[in-house]
Image (cartoon, coloured by chain):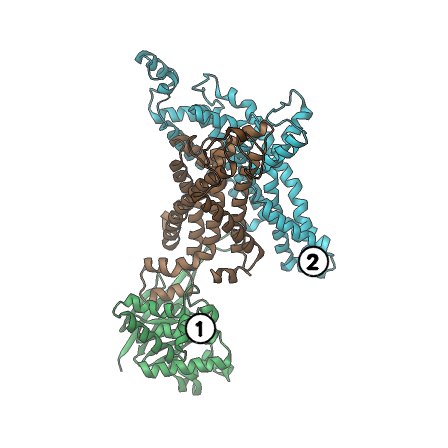
Amino acid sequence: MKKLFAKHNNWFFKAGFILTTVMVFIVLLGQVWTPYDPNAMDASVKAQGPTLRHLLGTDFFGRDILSRILEGAGATLQIAFFVVLIGAVLGTVIGALTGYFGGVVDEVLMRICDAITAFPSVLLALIAIAVIGPGRLNVIMVLGCVFIPSFARIVRAEFVRIKRLNYISLARLQGVGDFRIMLKHILPNTLPTLLPAISIGFNNAVLAEASMSFLGVGVSASEVSLGRMLSDSQNYILRGLPWYAVFVGLTIALLILGFSLLAEGLQQRR
Amino acid sequence: MKFVLKKLATLLITLLILSFLAYAAFEMVGDPVGMILGTNATPEAEAALREELGLNRSLPVRYFDWLFHFVKGDMGTSYIYRISVNEMIGEKLGLTVILTLFGFGLTLLMSIPLGVYSARREGSFADRALTVSNQIVMAIPAFFVAILLTVIFGVLLRLFTPGSFVSFNESPGRFFLYMLFPALSVAIPRTAMAAKMLRSSILGEMQKDYVRTAFSRGHNRRSALRAHALKNALLPIVAFLATTAAEMLAGCIVIEQIFSLPGIGRLLIASINNRDIPVVEAIVMILAVWVMVVHFFGEVISEALDPRLRS
Amino acid sequence: MNKILEVKHVSASYTTQGNAFAREKVQIVLHDVSFDLYEGEALGLVGESGSGKTTVARAILGFLPRYEGEIIHHSKRPQLIFQDPYTSLNPARTVGWILEEPLKVYGKFDAPERRRRIIEMLENVGLSEEYMSRRPSELSGGQRQRVSIAAALIVRPRLVIADEPVSALDVTIQAQILQLLDEMREKYGLSYLFISHDMNVVYQLCDRVIVMKKGVIVEDAPIDDIFDHPQHPYTRELVEASR
């Protein structure tokens, strides 16, 4: 951690690191404690703006918006985590194998990856959800798969570059096997590229979940997430009560901003 | 020319494969007959509908039939409304295209001056402020910009009424005023991204030998910038703009929902929820063609600007 | 004396890609190269860049996918020391890890034995135990080349190929590294194939010299003969240039 700071001692990294840490900490805190029960209705405080009792106001049912945002953000981050996990792990495996061994399989797979990454990921995910139906698990699987090609491309490029370097030739001369070379000799050197990609992955996953659920083609109607809340909050704007949408949007924007600054900082040295 | 033909062939093959995958995938969604008639329909009625929709033929036959008609411009008949898909999509597509072009135009209009200004005043306070704000703005999702614009200009300033779209025929002036806000929503984050890229691209070019040579020949910084750097600096931007045009269309789906615009995005979402497969297929293909064609032009323009890419 | 390596009639070529201006053509990089290397011998391989000397090394180490002729090894695991000490050490790993990896792969030693051997080898090349936890980025060029030598020798090879191992270093460091290589040869009874463009460097280490030009061996003689009675005009040129 200390080393990471020394290597990336720039404004973006610090700001992104602090913002992300604070946001994730608050969301994690929300998993064990919220000011109110997110589902408790209180008829005496319906549809209020921010007050001291309800910092972010209440909805039509008198439910505390802060508590609901904490719950929704937890669900969204959880989805993002698994999406990035699937995308990064499978993308790394595919990128490493094709980059290291090359050949016809590599050619074909990369052509497919190029075609897929040309399409906006939200659009692909929307279409896939249209086929297999909404729900949290489906969103995770679909977005995870949609994210694989971009990780595969990044990791492949790194493997192609690094496998030609002298220290890899030497490892081969010393009798180190292919898979050990990939795992222990090349993979650690892809981290400077992989870390920002993972950060961007979180950024994109939060954005995609929010967009999809907002459109009603994400998590199912009974589940919570920031995207679903954004969709609910639409009705409040039209009735002249905009703070709900603003706070949900702000939460999403701050989460994304943190990951995006972190990624930028990780890419810049100094 | 050879390059263009090769890219064109790749484009067509990709679209062909894509169209088959999309068609086959939607066929797996389920039997539309049961969905349309409900569970207590007579077998005769089901058979009749199956006949009418042409579902009694095999998948490849149906696919080629559909593809053949699609290429001719006939996108089929809606399962739910029983009217031609062309008719359903027609005007809505126009609105989405207007929104995309409007947003794209705004992006160009705002990002090029910002990027050039920032590069010209490299290191100044204005440049640093722009760099930081670009980094922040590009991370703000378009829908949040949309919410803020709605709240500020719709709810507080009452420049437009959120949720009540004004069509062009009703009042062209109010139509464009209404469209300005969704267009700004998709344009603002992209503008920040494009300005940032343009700045670093110009600065990268200024470091190169040929620009330095231009300086030593007595050009001042401005004309060296204009004469040499800008053209080359635009090169990486072209590919980025192609991606932007593709992403913007996807972004419009969300934006249409927020501003209640009767565009193709809303129709797509409604059709997905209704399981109106022919409409979904048609829209997906239109979007796919758009994305591939935009990337095709991006590649061809990049190539025209820089023959070195030809290899 | 026993042979440790036999190179018999090795030829290699590659085909250039054709384009609008040039037809594709076959470029010959090695033509009928033959020599033997004996146990304990330090053989210099000298020539300008493009003479094919590095291609010979690549063929010997099995990095060249296609060549004609035959290469017979009488030892296992020949090792290589690269010219550039900056790309020959894994930047993500510590010196200790880099030295331990071949021992782990070899698989015959337990952890304490591996550590003992690493420390011994570090001392051999003039570095202390503390260097185990250092990363390549924290080392100077000379130190890196010492680590490279340690990494090559830790698997106890009998043949070491050194591809311009000192030409990226300062002159004072060059002398130290050459002396180290000489000491290691004594200590472990190594054979060297020492590739260089610099006759002076070769003179300090080698017993015999092969001179190559345009993929062909033009002269193969003991070091003193090369310097005192060069036969080929190209050899004479190289010797003159080094005075």
Kind of element beneath mark 1 = helix
- Residue contact between numbered discs 2 and 1, judged by CB atoms under 8 Å: no
Colour of chain B, in one word, is cyan
The answer to whether residue A107 is above or below residue A130 is below
Residue A205 image label = none
The letter of the green chain is: C
Kind of element beneath mark 2 = helix
Residue C144 image label = 1
Q: Mark 2 and mark 1: span between their CA atoms?
A: 42 Å
**Amino acid residing under circle 2:** Ala
- Can you give x and y, in whole percent of width and height, for residue C27 in the image? 43, 62
The answer to whether residue C68 is above or below residue B205 is below
A200 or C27: nearer the eye? A200
- The answer to which image quadrant residue B146 occupies is top right
Q: Chain of mark 1?
A: C
- Can you give x and y, in whole percent of width and height, for residue A215 in the image? 49, 31
- The answer to which image quadrant residue C184 occupies is bottom left
Task: Tell me if residue B68 can be seen.
Answer: no
Colour of chain A, in one word, is brown
**Amino acid residing under circle 1:** Arg
Density class for disc 1 (Cα within 10 Å; few <14, some 14-19, many ≥20) is many
Q: Residue at x 39, y 26 (%)?
A: B64
A51 or B279: nearer the eye? A51
- Can you give x and y, in whole percent of width and height, for residue B68 in the image? 43, 25
Q: Quadrant of the N terminus of chain C?
A: bottom left
Instruction: Read off the residue under disc 2.
Output: B214
